[in-house]
Image (cartoon, rainbow, N blue to C red):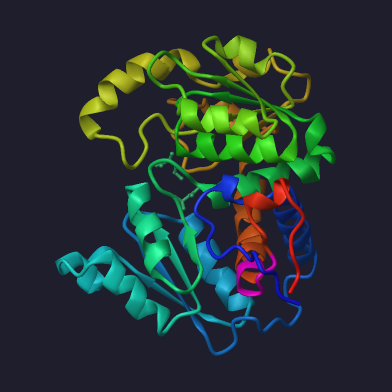
Amino acid sequence: MHLAWAMKDLLRTADLSRRDLALLLELAGRFKTRPYQHRSELANQTVVLFFDKPSTRTRISLATAVARLGGVPIVVGPDELQLGRGETIEDTAKTLSRYARVFVARTYRDEDVERFARAATIPVINALTDRHHPLQSLADLMTLDERFGDLREVELAWVGDGNNVCHSLIEAMSLAGGVMRVATPDGYAPDPAIVEAARARGGRITLVRDPREAVHGAHAVYTDTWVSMGDPEVERAARVDALTPYRVDEALMARARPGALFMHCLPDHRGEEVSAEVVDGPRSIVFEQAENRLHTAVAVLHALVEERLVGERDDEEEGVWR
Ligand code: CP
Ligand code: NVA
């Protein structure tokens, strides 16, 4: 069976329909339960993983996911491709489409990943850009789903910088039907266009300034680094100043729902956005999130290669089978 509207690329979480999200979480759960069942979707094929920024989890989980589906991952940095010497994104994408089955890219600008996707005839996956981190949000929702069951009942607090991880979580929570309260200082709020689009799809997203207001009643509290990989290093001091009141420590966690969990995409910076006590403590589920990066990566690769995803349009209309 083949969907007329099969979605080619995963560039941001909002590319997915609600049923795509449900399918990916279900697939990821199956791959987690039976990780070594023989699969051959990618047998005899390569997946090119291009990283223009450092990565531990995304890079290794995706390479492992490719191997679990029977394929061979080829991980490259910018200086290893002619891209680093000025070959265009379009020429690179067209060339790689003749060799590989999937192309994965971590870049600074979102436009670069979008250009890869437009020029490539193979699926392109965003492995983090300055504005989005869709793979992380899928692992996070899988983790919340495992912990709480019904995502529509979950209240998630985001505390800190309204960055790429925050954007993708806003999109994911709005698809899943949960509540998300985002507390940021002035100047660090998530992109209003992303928030508005999520709300237009039914997202229950609230923006506040006070971290205590965001965590009140929350089942889980999420934070991320104050200085992301795309942020200019000269901004560091100003960021630390603005974001210090947003550190997640035991006092802030005590204001959340009793037994509330702590989440972080990692890498974390103990003593900056989170205290060591919290991230290393019993409420922390950061390594569950990290593990689920692998299972959701297998699910995404499988679903894109098998053309199982229909994309965002399916929320409005039923998919057409051909
Ligand atoms: N969370 C995450 O994307 O980690 P890496 O930067 O190590 O890939
Ligand atoms: N916001 C962080 C996430 C790292 C996984 C960054 O972009 O650097």
Horizontally, residue 148 falls left or right of residue 62, namely: right
Q: Is residue 223 visible?
A: no
Residue at (50, 78) in percent of width and height? 101
Residue 178 on image: x %, y %: 74, 31
Q: Quadrant of residue 252?
A: top right
Q: Which region is colored magenta?
A: 303-308
From this viewpoint, which residue is outermost toward the bottom?
44
Q: Quadrant of residue 161?
A: top left
Q: Quadrant of residue 204?
A: top right
From this viewpoint, which residue is outermost toward the right?
149
Residue 163 on image: x %, y %: 45, 33
Residue 239 on image: x %, y %: 33, 22
- Name the image quarter holding the C terminus: bottom right
Residue at (55, 40) in percent of width and height? 168
Which one is nearer the viewer's eye here, 255 or 123? 123
Residue at (51, 39) in percent of width and height? 165
Which one is nearer the viewer's eye here, 39 or 131? 131
- Asked if 303 appears above or below 168 in the picture, the reply is below
Horizontally, residue 213 falls left or right of residue 115, namely: right
Q: Per the image, is 134 magenta?
A: no
Residue 309 on image: x %, y %: 67, 62
Q: Per the image, is 307 magenta?
A: yes
- Asked if 307 appears above or below 255 in the picture, the reply is below
Which one is nearer the viewer's eye here, 153 or 294? 153
